[in-house]
Amino acid sequence: MKEKIIGIGTWLDKVADSLVTREKKLGRSLDLIRVESGLGASGIPHIGSMGDAVRAYGISLALQNLGFNSELITYSDDMDGLRKIPAGFPSWLEEYIAKPVSTIPDPFGKCHNSYANHMSSLLSDSLDRVGIKYIFKSASDIYRSGILNNEIDCILQNSELLGKKISTLVGQDKYIDTLPYFPICENCKRLYVTHAEKYLSVERKIIYTCSGSKIGTREIPGCGYSGESRIDKGSGKLAWKVEFASRWKALDIRFEAYGKDIMDSVRVNDWVCSSLLDFPHPLHVKYEMFLDKVGKKISKSTGNVLTPQMWLKYGSPESILLLLYKRISGTRHIGLDDIPMLMDEYDYYEDLYFNKIKEHNNSKLHKYKGIYEYINKLNPPPKSSKHVPYRILVQQASLFEGKERSHKIFQRLKKYGLVEEKTHDLINRITLASTWSDDLSMEDRLPISINAKEKDALVDLLTELKNLTGKDSQKIADNIQTRIFEISKKHKIEPRLFFKLLYQILINSDRGPKLGNYLEDLGLHRTCQIIEKYI
């Protein structure tokens, strides 16, 4: 049975289609379908933080592709209290533990008006650099403006029922005895250390005591102050277990993905949204965590952060969007060493899109072409670029330095027939690869396995190269090319496999320019030095 292709054949289209079907069943207006992504403001944003927003934008694009008006809301939780000092941050932040990050000075100087603004701006910067369109909302502005007042009031009036439900759903008894709201202590200005004891619904006031609390594994003492806090003054915030629900309703959010680390919070918020606030909770997609190469969760607090800015120092916006759009399920082990592969993989998707290469599996072809379109925000270029493998650019960059570096690399590529004209995209890629060559190339060697037959062939090639002489560079290049073919046949190695081995040894890639010309340019003495390391 032929598989039905939805939209342009990607997981984004399937989610968007499910969302529209659900909304129609609920009978809600489809004039504008809002999707949301939460932006953490308590630490350096990493690839996972960016991924949440990028994927939500992909759903918004898919909805637009299906003919619906849609927009992405990015919600910065800048009312969150600082729970601990992230690795590498200044120690003076200790005095701001449990204070809202929007009230803490910028720890990196005076470039932003607060800690939260600095962190949020880093994520906004990365989204801007890859072309994501979004509407930014900050929690501090939302609370101060009173947008959540009715939702907060409803939640607090039903706090007894809510406390019991939270206990039933996730086994947490905390909110049986306390309201799911944290006033900012008027005396010490801290959050989470206050105990909300009573809600006066008519006055919309909370009676609280600053009695202290356990944050993570650490006991944070309260100052002992007792006071009142109005919910319409932005001087406090809802607990996570209920806050998502309040903004889903207030902002009319129809889709939000989530990571498995907050599954319990999402379960409670879904119930609060649908049952207490009378607003069907958004459609969700659960995604797995990004892990580093040793299997640890990428974390703002522990310091093993791979930031979008780090990635974009070496890779194109298209490479990072490919990483995030390829799939949503499954744990991902990522690092900067994935960039060369993803740069070349994007070129593969482009060649498929423009039918330069064939893919006989129709489902895969639709998926690859669809992902390519989403990477290009449903506005792909009119024609394919001329592609040069990233590792070849890195290797060429290692041969040159100085102001004329990009031009010299271009001239080499043109000589090898890999490019025809100097384009903005090509020069940008050369710049990225040059930075990689300067910073990371020694850490990026492909593993090479050489058997006895191949080793003997390399020894023969070394002998031939050392005996080649002459002044005519093109004649030398042609002789090298001929010798490689002859030696591969002599040792009964398929020529394409012997060429592939030489590319891996000399260029750190599976393919590249015509080897005769390349080796002559590299210099026979230098070529022999490199090959000798492997035999």
Image: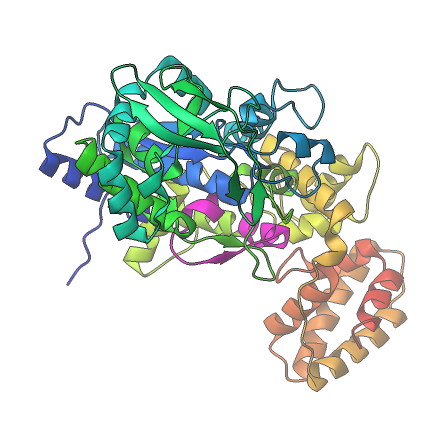
What residue sits 80% from the left and 69% below the top? 531
Q: Does the magenta segment cover residue 324?
A: yes
What residue sits 14% from the left and 29% below the top? 28
- Residue 22 in the image: state x and y as whole percent: 16, 40
Against 202, residue 288 (above or below) is below
User: Considering the image in quadrants, where does the C terminus appear?
Assistant: bottom right
Number of labelled discs? 0
Please indicate, yes or no, whether residue 16 appears anywhere in the rendered image. no
Against 489, residue 479 (above or below) is above
**Left or right of 359 on screen, residue 498:** right
- Residue 444 in the image: state x and y as whole percent: 69, 58
Q: Does the magenta segment cover residue 224?
A: no
- Residue 12 in the image: state x and y as whole percent: 31, 44
Based on the displayed image, in which of its 4 quarters is residue 471 positioned? Answer: bottom right
Based on the displayed image, in which of its 4 quarters is residue 249 positioned? Answer: top left
**Left or right of 242 on screen, residue 227:** right
- Give the colour scheme shown: rainbow
Against 16, residue 115 (above or below) is above
- Residue 487 in the image: state x and y as whole percent: 72, 78
Question: In the depicted view, which residue is nearer to us: 483 or 451?
Answer: 451
Please indicate, yes or no, whether residue 62 appears anywhere in the rendered image. yes
Question: In the depicted view, which residue is nearer to us: 231 or 385?
Answer: 231
Question: In the depicted view, which residue is nearer to us: 32 or 301?
Answer: 301
The chief SS type of the magenta part is helix
What residue sits 68% from the left and 71% below the top? 448
User: Considering the image in quadrants, where does the N terminus appear?
Assistant: bottom left
Which residues fall within the magenta stretch?
320-344
Question: In the depicted view, which residue is nearer to us: 357 or 7?
Answer: 7
